[in-house]
Image: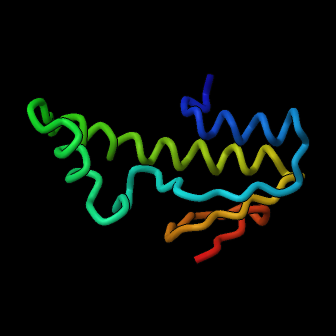
Amino acid sequence: WWLQNSGLFAMCYMCKVWNLKKIYIFGFNFYSDDYLNNSIETELKKANRENYNPKEYQELIKSSKKLKDNFIKLVKICKKTDFYFYGNCEFENKPQNLKIIL
């Protein structure tokens, strides 16, 4: 399915099945920001000490744009739901029902 992400699928389910009017999103950074105290690349190196593969990091970076685009597409489809996004992320053509909380 076009969402291709369990987080996005959960949001879609909450909108379409549960008919939620508000969804609060924490920790959803599209693989594009530091994770806790380290960069995503550093976390990958720590998790895969013996088998770190730089290609895995590059794949995450590439998937970042697609994930972000699919998130915006989902927000536009779920017009009756307000999404409260907690984080430091910029969106081009941000839908009105997407609220950024810094």
Residue 68 position, x and y percent, is 53, 49
Residue drawn at x 51%, y 43% is: 67
Residue placed at 18% from the left, 36% from the top?
48
Relative horizontal placement of residue 76, taking residue 72 as reference (left or right): right
Judge from the rendering whether residue 90 lies leftward or rightward of residue 46; answer left or right: right
In depth, the one of 60 and 39 nearer the eye is 39
In the figure, residue 12 lies in which quadrant? Answer: top right
* Furthest residue in direction left, as rendered: 50
- Outermost residue on the bottom side: it is 102
From the viewer's side, name the closer residue of 90 and 34: 34
Q: Nearer the viewer, residue 29 or 65?
A: 29
Q: Residue furthest top?
A: 1
Residue at the image position 64 percent from the left and 63 percent from the top = 85
Pinpoint residue 34: horizontal percent, then vertical percent: 34, 62
Residue drawn 66% across the image and 33% down it = 9
> Where is 24 relative to 86, above or below?
above
How many marks can you see?
Answer: 0
Q: Quadrant of the C terminus?
A: bottom right
Horizontal side of residue 20 vs 83, given as left or right: right
Q: Quadrant of the N terminus?
A: top right
Q: How is the image coloured?
A: rainbow
Residue 79: x and y in percent read 85, 51
Which of the 4 image quadrants contains residue 16? top right
Taking 11 as reference, is 6 above or below it? above
